[in-house]
Image (spheres, helix red, strand yellow):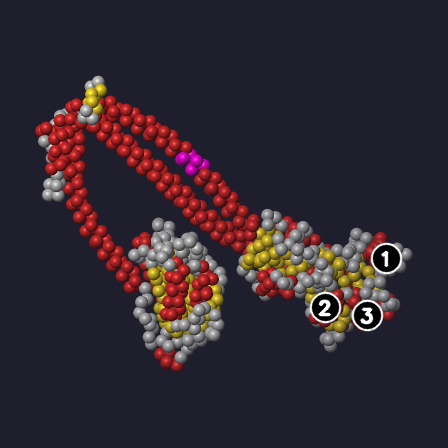
Amino acid sequence: MKKFRKLVIGGIESKVVSLVMISMILVAAVFIASMLTQNKVLTDLTQTTNERQLATVTGTTAAVIDTVIEQNMDRITDLEAKMTDVLFRAVSTRVNLLGDIARELLTDPDAVKRVQWQRPDAAYDGELFVKALFTEGLEPETVDDKLGVLANLSDLMVYLCKSYDSDNIWFTLPEGATLMADTVPGNWIAADGSFVAYNATNRYWYRQAVQAGKLTFSDVEYDRRTGDLCVTCALPVYDEQGTLLGVAGSDVFLHDMQQAVNESTHDGAFLVVVNQSGHVVVAPADEDHGIFRPINSAVAIDLRGSDNKELAALITDAQKAKTDVRMVTLPDGRYYMIGVPMETVGWTILAGYSVESAEQPTRQLEQDFQSIQMEAVTTYRSQSKTGQRLVWIIIAVLLIAMQLGALFMGKRIVKPLNTIATRIAELSETNLEFKMEDTFRTGDEVEELAQSFANVSHKTVEYLETVKTVTAEKERLGAELSLATQIQGAMLPHIVPAFPDRKDFDVIGSMDPAKEVGGDFYDYFLIDDDHLCMVIADVSGKGVPAALFMMASKIILQSVAMLGGSPAEILTKTNQAICSNNEAEMFVTVWVGILELSTGKLTCSNAGHEYPVFRRPDGSFELLKDRHGFVIGGMEGTKYKEYEVQLEPGAKLFVYTDGVPEATNDAQELFGTERMIEALNRQPEAEPMDVLKNVRKAVDEFVKDAEQFDDLTMLCLEYKGPTGDNDLKGE
């Protein structure tokens, strides 16, 4: 040992100083490492939480926007259809009235006074003027008498035009003479002063009305007088013997309709009018979709036969009844579209709204959220660095203070330390507790150190007792979780076969939870002898909370189903019950199907669940992309829709939760629906139990040793058709 000033180098005193320094350095290193680790964990947790919040907010916002778009499109198209229908109802009213009066006059011409008719006169341009027009080659004298009878209609024609805000109406005789009221009589006079011939009987509207034998609306045509696009309303008039007396008609110009359509075109929205022949009648003036340009009927394309199957189906369905909102691909993008028929004229109004425009609020919300998140992370990291610098300063000060204290107090602690070391050396398995002695009561850090050893020793003994207690508690919790697993399994159908007395169907399901208990469930039960209800669902989250929510949801669903009602009504009532007391804000995706066993009719409804898979007899399994409703527990007041699938004897149904397609291997690849369909079609004729085994085997071969991430639940039904035994049983 060497002595440097008052410090003995190599002695106990120097070793104590070194020990204190090393201890402080180690403590500081552990503290810093713990602080950095905690900081990273908090940063990652914050980022993950924000991403999940963003996904939830944007998903909910997108669903709300879709609902608003659907409601607004319904309202706009209904309003436009009703307003436009009024326009055509007005023209049909005045044409019918003119036709009725003309029939009375021409049926008994001997009782009618002859009135002098007139030829076109440019002096009356701008006024309603009634004049006679003749087809080429027809001498006026040959029809003078009939025109004298028809001239009695002159005042009525002027009155009808003024009352219905129209500028033309006419009546054409089969011989080719026309009595017409309009505001441009000068247009019927040629430059040389002769009268322009008007071959009315060769016009499309005349031939169409005579062929139909009833009031008709023509396709879009160019008006002979003005050159503008118009539609002609024409009514053939017959006497009691069925002889054609003539055709009454009036034009409907599309200015007002065109203006309404133009005004509707904004921010990705537009309106289009299609007639009964599938031709575009009115479209936005700046139409840029490539297929909605209105043109003359001679060259117009029937959109019902278009290569665009989505658009063709929409127009065909809309001519029969109002459609639901559908997704249609146009040359410039995807659109939400809806069609509403116009009862009077037989036309259809189509409304469209750009998917890109609809998603713009969601994208903006996502950008704003990410901006706020980045700002928060930046602020957190800046403050964290400031805190780290402060911690470094504090540690440095403590190290210096401890060094000085160690040097000062080194000599005082040498003797008691030797005793402490001796007592520590005497500790053994049978003597674990270090106890205070009078030698250690120095009134300084040595006493505190000895007391610390005594406390640690005492706490160690207590810790051992605690470990024993905790071990026993852990064993108890394990037993309770095992019991919970058994209870949950007992709540699911587990008897095989499920209905041994029924020969008309076979059904089986399975659930493999990712943890001791899971959030998935399936069920199948007979509502009555002829109706089998099937349910498969996936609760948000995992573990015990999801299992509790699953059990409550299953009980509610089964209770509602047993009360009767369609799948859509079952989901609607279940959603109402769960939303009324859902403080945990959990939700569940559900697919419900009710099979009428005597007919094979399967009625289904989907609340945000995976697409079902069907197999026709002697066919292969195929995915049915049905329409999804919103998840159960996500929004109060949600209404659900349903659809029907006809099952023939030998058909199969396969439904599942997202744990099947989202099963992940070590390379983070998803199993996917394509591999699932592949697995189903390896033995499409297999029994339902073997179908589930085949899919599970394919999943296991894919994921191999990777940990199961989510609950894996499946259900398979084979419909075998009604049998005599079941018929007798039903009786």
Query: Distance of mark 3 from mark 1, alpha carbons?
Result: 21 Å
Judged by depth in the image, the label closer to the viewer, 3 or 2, is 2
For residue 175, which numbered disc appears in the image? Answer: 3
Query: Distance of mark 3 from mark 2, alpha carbons?
Result: 16 Å
Q: Nearer the viewer, residue 41 or 214?
A: 41
Does the CB distance between marks 3 and 2 fall below 8 Å? no
Q: Earlier in the sequence, mark 3 or mark 1?
A: 3
Query: Distance of mark 1 from mark 2, alpha carbons?
Result: 28 Å
- Mark 1 neighbour class, 10 Å CA radius: few under 14, some 14 to 19, many 20 or more: some
* Residue at the spot 41% in from the left edge and 42% down from the top edge: 47
Residue 449: image location, x then y, percent: 17, 30
Is residue 504 positioned above or below 33 on the image? below
Is label 1 in a helix, a strand or a loop?
loop
The amino acid pointed to by label 1 is: Ile
The amino acid pointed to by label 3 is: Glu
Displayed quadrant of residue 478? bottom left
Q: Earlier in the sequence, mark 1 or mark 2?
A: 1
- Mark 2 neighbour class, 10 Å CA radius: few under 14, some 14 to 19, many 20 or more: many
Q: Earlier in the sequence, mark 3 or mark 2?
A: 3
* Residue at the spot 38% in from the left edge and 64% down from the top edge: 696
Residue 122: image location, x then y, percent: 84, 54
Q: Which residue is mark 2?
A: 209
Q: Which residue is mark 1?
A: 189
Q: Nearer the viewer, residue 415 or 7?
A: 7
* Residue at the spot 85% in from the left edge and 66% down from the top edge: 136
Is label 3 in a helix, a strand or a loop?
loop
Displayed quadrant of residue 712? bottom left
Answer with left or right where residue 476 lies relative to residue 156. left
Please give the range of residues in magenta: 375-381
The amino acid pointed to by label 2 is: Ala
Is label 2 in a helix, a strand or a loop?
helix
